[in-house]
Image (tube, grey):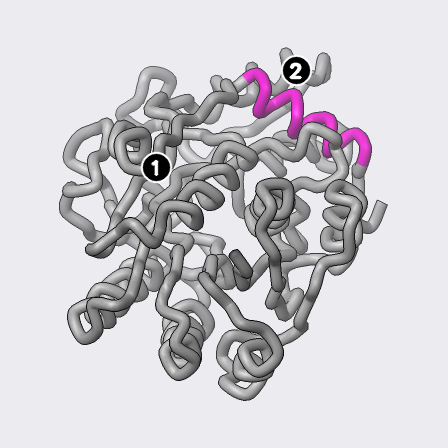
Amino acid sequence: MKVLVTGGAGYIGSHTVVLLIEAGHEVVVFDNFCNASKESIRRVEKIVNQKITVVEGDIRSREELQKVFDVHTIDAVIHFAGLKAVGESVEKPFIYYDNNVHGSTVLFEVMAKNACKSIIFSSSATVYGDPHTTPILENFPTSATNPYGRSKLMVEEILRDVYVSDSEWKIVLLRYFNPVGAHKSGTIGEDPNGIPNNLMPFIAQTAVGKREYLSVFGDDYDTPDGTGVRDYIHVVDLADAHVKAVEKISNFNEVMTINLGTGKGYSVLEMVKAFEKASGRRVPYKIAPRRAGDIATCFADPSYAKEILGWVATRGVDEMCEDGWRWQMSNPMGYKS
């Protein structure tokens, strides 16, 4: 299949591109590089030993997207492109709704115009808000607690409306939890612009000496050690689920909503200890106030993904930390190293 990957130069996108190509698919990457590096594409090309077609553009631009479809016959789209920081979304909601929601509707309109009606959408566990219980099932009520989560939920609802209007669409909504780790080679990994918004880059940058200490946002949650509990999933496992979704999407006759997680939650301090074990380095930390929009506990029931996609997460927390540390040690300044 020829797959258009929006946001394909980003963290999850770049790992997915590697696995798509290794599985024999053709890939076109569409990215505006606002939160990604062109160096990631060059490194992906080294991993897969071939050139990758890259189109620089913004999903809010019909003209730039149409140029892709003018040149390429696209069979399916994996839609990663979007802003993704919870804290920033609380501070700057306008840009999240403009980029994530408006940009997605433009993409879907261009797809429909060009009779490309298969899409895998990169959604998020944040759509569940503060769940009443865990593990989280796909049929749980949705109630996002921040603009980032609401933008994902809005796009999900738009896609459901698209399907109601035209049942020829094949739609997979992948709600994933907390991606961490890096490619085994240490060649590609997570390289956030500026101050990281996710836990693992903070831990890794502290371990490598780039940061003086890790800020732990809140130690008074109703969890075993007071710090937030999350379901951390290796980014390569996550990428593998997207490849499986591409290969099975033609079989689906309804909008498929699928959780991607390991089914186990780890607290912030447990992740710190696991990373210290993997790196052999101390990770100093200080307790800071809770962040707006954060919740206490969030982890998945991944059984539906196994049933529908034949997918399970195979990499544990030790491998997540080891691979994340290998990336950080090899690239202390990220792709600028």
Q: Residue furthest right?
A: 337
**Residue 70 screen position, x and y as percent:** 57, 83
Q: CA distance from mark 1 to mark 2?
A: 31 Å
- Which of 227/257 is in front? 257
**Among the two numbered marks 1 and 2 on one chain, the one whose residue lies closer to the N terminus:** 2
Residue 238, numbered circle: none
Residue flagged by tag 2: what amino acid is it? Ala
Residue flagged by tag 1: what amino acid is it? Leu
Q: Is residue 276 above or below residue 19?
A: above
Count the labels in the image. Answer: 2
Dot 1: within a 10 Å radius of its alpha carbon, few (fewer than 14), some, or many (20 or more) residues? some
Where does label 1 land, which residue? 309
| Magenta part, dominant SS | helix
Query: Is residue 55 shown in magenta?
Result: no
Residue 278, numbered circle: 2
Q: Which residues are magenta?
A: 318-330
Position of residue 267 in the picture relative to residue 32 (left or right): left
- Which of 221/40 is in front? 40
- Which of 223/312 is in front? 312
Label 1 or label 2, whichever lies nearer to me, is 1
Position of residue 210 in the picture relative to residue 180 (left or right): right
In which quarter of the view is residue 320 placed? top right
